[in-house]
């Protein structure tokens, strides 16, 4: 039979064969080339005499292909550049050493002659080198000449102008060198080094001049920004790439330092005058960024520069406003400047610049909202502190109500205004388009946050904040109920014949519903301060969400119904506490909620609403059980009532599985009641489970005769027989073993008559163990009369019997193996 390898192994074999074929082909091609060369040499005219003729007549021999030549590890241009750079560096080091060390051994004329001659020679040498095409050598010599001009300037200061200030001289020297190098580079256009070197040197003169004249911080910052502006102009206008790179690096470097310095000056300004001067510097930086964005060739770079320019503009204008406004109005001032950027519209600006300004405005608004979020968190989480001070007394105002356990942030009185302003901007900006629903959802959330923190900010009375939150809850629920729903559908021709898709909640609906729930929770937390407020708020919220659940038909019904039942549970607990009831008595009142939930779920047609109602009812039942857990008699009653509710739910065809929960609750109720009566007999706990289980198994066997006896009767019999057997083994009296043995005998007889395996095994095993338990004393007495050698002898006989049986089984296994081996 052909053994076909797996695909991976076959692929490996094929790859190996192909590699061998490629190697063989290469050998044949090499031999073919050699043979062609031999034939061409044979066709050429043979020499008349000499060793050449003898070699032509020599028969060809099989020669191995010539080895490939070894490739050089370095290219010729690379070697050339290394040599030239190394030579230029060595000459530069020698020139520096001569200037610093050997300068004093020559006179003034000698010094001037040497430096002048060397510098002139170094700067003039590139001209003939370029004519001969030695461009790299010319670049190296020109670099040496540029370094020599720096040394000339240093020597001139040390010898001729020692009394001149070093910083001022350096400023003038760098400016002169930048001009000379630029002119030298323009005159010799083939050289690439002088112009970038001149551009790099041009970064220093203005800054050094400001340091030389001992200028202030504002003047030095202005020098940095002017240098950045010059670099920006060069980077956007000069076509030479090397110069553009140096100018771009200089623009970003000096611009960032100047921007940071201007921002620090604006933040440290203590009056309008200082703030205005810092704002002028920031305005210059913004003008540089926006001008670069306007002329930038790449759209992404332009958008980033416009974003930076917009943020700098906001910092400039906001810094002036901050110097004249109170501390609480600092963020609103910056926010106003950020919103003003949205007014920059029109086609005279490129789209990338307008997009960057919009991003900068969005960034400022996001930072303003982030500044207000701590206050929103304090107001929203603060009422949780009333859980430890329930009904301790109403606070004096809204701020005291939300700062029970958290302090009030300082200078946040304008946070509601900031949130409302950003919400208004979202509504006015996104009047249409694909992002309108998301923007409106964000605006709704910001407006809700503004309303949430407004009472505490204004320190309104306690009753006023409750009414405000109640109205907010109603408004958000109404917005969730009346908002439009989105439909999920395909517009293709293959989908036109299908029924329309079910509407789904829009982002506005989900946002409004979530805000309504948060507001209601916040309101319920605040109401814990006073008893009357708690009862009124919980009752109102229960009725409100119940009305919305009865009114609406879509997904909002599920959430509203669950919220109504949850608040009804809290209302039941609060009502019982108001009446000074004990917790186990309140548990009976709470059971009205799961009962109502079961009745309501039976009438709902929506599966989502039904499931949410049932889950909430189950949670309410757990609350009732937890309240009654310290009083066993009442706990048994609560468990039994929960079992009744579960059994009523199991009557519905789609909730048949709840019957198991109902049975478990009934059993638990029985056990708790027996435990409260201090009943210690296990049969009292197991028989209430065994009897219903056997009845259910009998009914199932009648409906389905194929059901196993272990499935029908095994669980029910095991629940009673096993615990009773364990109790009988530790019982010294005779009634329990007698009753258990009688019951086991009856089960065995029934199993023998009906031929049921489960009954025979469980009943017979129990009967045998009970009999062994009764005979145990006599067996122990008999074992005392048996000699001690009898148990080892019996054990040995048992082991011999087992060994013989094991050997017979091994012999049978070998016979089967031999038979299978002879089969084909």
Image (tube, rainbow, N blue to C red):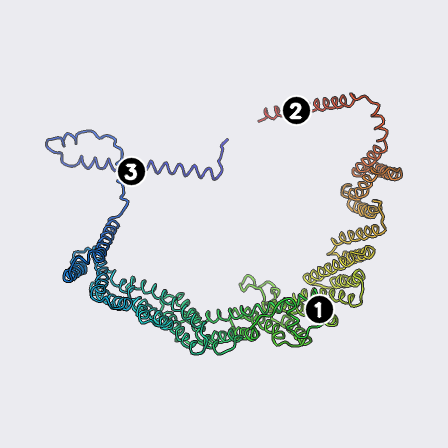
Is 656 drawn above or below residue 178 in the view shown? above
**SS category of the residue bearing label 2:** helix
Q: Position of residue 610 (x, y in %)?
A: 70, 61
Q: Gap between marks 2 and 1, in whole Å?
A: 81 Å
- Whether residue 345 can be seen here: no
Q: Residues within 10 Å of mark 1 (few under 14, many from 20)?
A: many
Q: Residue furthest left?
A: 48
Quadrant where the C terminus is found in the figure: top right
Q: Kindly identify which numbered label has been placed on residue 29.
A: 3
Q: Nearer the viewer, mark 1 or mark 3?
A: 1
| Residue position marked by numbered label 1 in the rendering | 528
The earlier-in-sequence mark between 2 and 3 is 3
Answer with left or right where residue 465 lies relative to residue 14.
right
Q: Position of residue 781 (x, y in %)?
A: 85, 27
Is 40 drawn above or below residue 699 in the view shown? above
Q: Gap between marks 2 and 3, in whole Å?
A: 68 Å
Q: Position of residue 379 (x, y in %)?
A: 62, 69
Is 506 drawn above or below residue 729 in the view shown? below
Answer with left or right where residue 346 lies relative to residue 61.
right
| Residue position marked by numbered label 2 in the rendering | 810
**SS category of the residue bearing label 1:** loop
Asked whether disc 2 touches disc 1, contact meaning CB atoms under 8 Å apart, the reply is no
Q: Kindly identify which numbered label has been placed on residue 468.
A: none
The earlier-in-sequence mark between 2 and 1 is 1
Asked whether disc 2 touches disc 3, contact meaning CB atoms under 8 Å apart, the reply is no
- In the foreground, 596 or 291: 291
């Amino acid at each position: 039979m052909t053994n076909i390898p797996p695909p991976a192994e076959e692929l490996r074999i094929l790859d190996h064969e192909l590699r061998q074929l490629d190697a063989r082909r290469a050998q044949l091609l090499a031999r073919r080339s050699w043979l062609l060369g031999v034939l061409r040499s044979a066709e050429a005219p043979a020499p008349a005499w000499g060793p050449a003729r003898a070699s032509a007549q020599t028969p060809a021999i099989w020669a191995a292909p010539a080895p490939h030549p070894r490739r050089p590890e370095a290219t010729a241009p690379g070697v050339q550049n290394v040599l030239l750079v190394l030579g230029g560096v060595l000459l530069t080091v020698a020139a520096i050493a001569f200037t610093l060390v050997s300068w004093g051994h020559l006179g003034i004329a000698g010094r001037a002659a040497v430096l002048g001659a060397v510098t002139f020679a170094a700067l003039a040498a590139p001209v003939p080198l370029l004519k001969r095409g030695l461009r790299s050598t010319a670049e190296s010599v020109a670099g040496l000449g540029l370094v020599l001009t720096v040394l000339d300037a240093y020597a001139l200061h040390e010898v001729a102008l020692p009394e001149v200030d070093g910083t001022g001289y350096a400023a003038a020297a760098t400016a002169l060198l930048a001009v000379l190098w630029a002119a030298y580079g323009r005159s010799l256009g083939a050289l690439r080094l002088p112009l970038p070197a001149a551009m790099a040197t041009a970064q220093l003169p203005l800054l050094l001049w400001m340091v030389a004249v001992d200028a202030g911080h504002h003047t030095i910052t202005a020098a940095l920004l002017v240098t950045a502006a010059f670099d920006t102009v060069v980077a956007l206008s000069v076509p030479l790439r090397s110069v553009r790179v140096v100018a771009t690096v200089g623009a970003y470097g000096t611009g960032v330092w100047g921007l940071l310095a201007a921002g620090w000056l604006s933040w440290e300004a203590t009056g309008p005058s200082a703030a205005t001067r810092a704002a002028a510097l920031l305005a210059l930086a913004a003008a540089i960024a926006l001008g670069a964005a306007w002329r930038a060739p790449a759209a992404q770079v332009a958008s980033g520069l416009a974003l930076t320019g917009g943020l700098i503009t906001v910092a400039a204008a906001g810094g002036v406003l901050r110097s004249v406004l109170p501390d609480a109005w600092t963020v609103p001032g910056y926010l106003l400047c950020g919103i003003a950027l949205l007014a920059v519209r029109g086609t005279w600006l490129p789209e990338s610049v307008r997009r960057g300004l919009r991003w900068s405005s969005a960034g400022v608004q996001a930072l303003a909202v982030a500044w207000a979020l701590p206050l929103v968190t304090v107001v929203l989480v603060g009422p949780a502190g009333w859980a430890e001070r329930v009904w301790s007394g109403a606070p004096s105002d809204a701020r005291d109500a939300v700062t029970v356990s958290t302090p009030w942030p300082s200078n946040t009185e304008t946070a509601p205004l900031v949130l409302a302003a950003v919400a208004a901007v979202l509504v006015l900006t996104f009047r249409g388009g694909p992002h309108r629903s998301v923007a409106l959802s964000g605006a709704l959330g910001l407006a809700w946050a503004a309303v949430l923190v407004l009472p505490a900010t204004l320190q309104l009375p306690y009753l006023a904040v409750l009414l405000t939150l109640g109205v907010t809850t109603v408004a958000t629920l109404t917005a969730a109920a009346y908002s439009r729903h989105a439909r999920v559908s395909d517009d293709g021709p293959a989908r036109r014949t299908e029924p329309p898709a079910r509407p789904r909640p829009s982002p506005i609906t989900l946002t409004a519903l979530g805000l309504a729930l948060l507001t209601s929770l916040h309101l319920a937390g605040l109401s814990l301060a006073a008893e009357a407020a708690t009862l009124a708020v919980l009752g109102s919220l229960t009725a409100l969400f119940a009305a919305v659940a009865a009114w609406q038909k879509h997904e909002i019904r599920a959430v509203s119904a669950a919220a109504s039942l949850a608040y009804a549970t809290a209302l039941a607990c609060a009502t019982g506490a108001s009446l000074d009831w004990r917790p186990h008595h309140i548990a009976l009142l709470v059971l009205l909620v799961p009962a109502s939930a079961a009745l309501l779920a039976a009438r709902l047609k929506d599966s989502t609403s039904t499931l949410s109602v049932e889950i909430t009812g189950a949670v309410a039942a757990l609350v009732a059980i937890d309240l009654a857990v310290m009083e066993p008699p009442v706990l048994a009653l609560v468990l039994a009532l929960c079992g009744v509710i579960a059994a009523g739910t199991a009557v519905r065809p789609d909730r048949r599985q709840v019957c198991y929960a109902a049975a478990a609750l009934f059993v638990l109720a029985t056990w708790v009641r027996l435990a409260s009566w201090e009943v210690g007999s296990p049969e009292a706990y197991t028989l209430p489970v065994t009897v219903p289980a056997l009845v259910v198994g009998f009914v199932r066997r009648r409906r389905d005769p194929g059901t196993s006896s272990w499935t029908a009767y095994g669980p029910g019999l095991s629940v009673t027989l096993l615990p009773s057997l364990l109790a009988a083994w530790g019982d010294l009296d005779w009634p329990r073993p007698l009753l258990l043995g009688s019951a086991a005998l009856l089960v065995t007889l029934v199993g023998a008559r009906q031929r049921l395996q489960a009954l025979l095994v469980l009943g017979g095993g129990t009967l045998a163990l009970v009999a062994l338990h009764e005979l145990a004393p006599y067996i122990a007495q008999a074992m005392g009369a048996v000699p001690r050698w009898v148990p080892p002898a019996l054990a040995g006989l048992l082991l011999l019997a087992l060994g013989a049986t094991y050997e017979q089984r091994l012999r049978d296994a070998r016979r089967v193996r031999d038979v299978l081996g002879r089969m084909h």
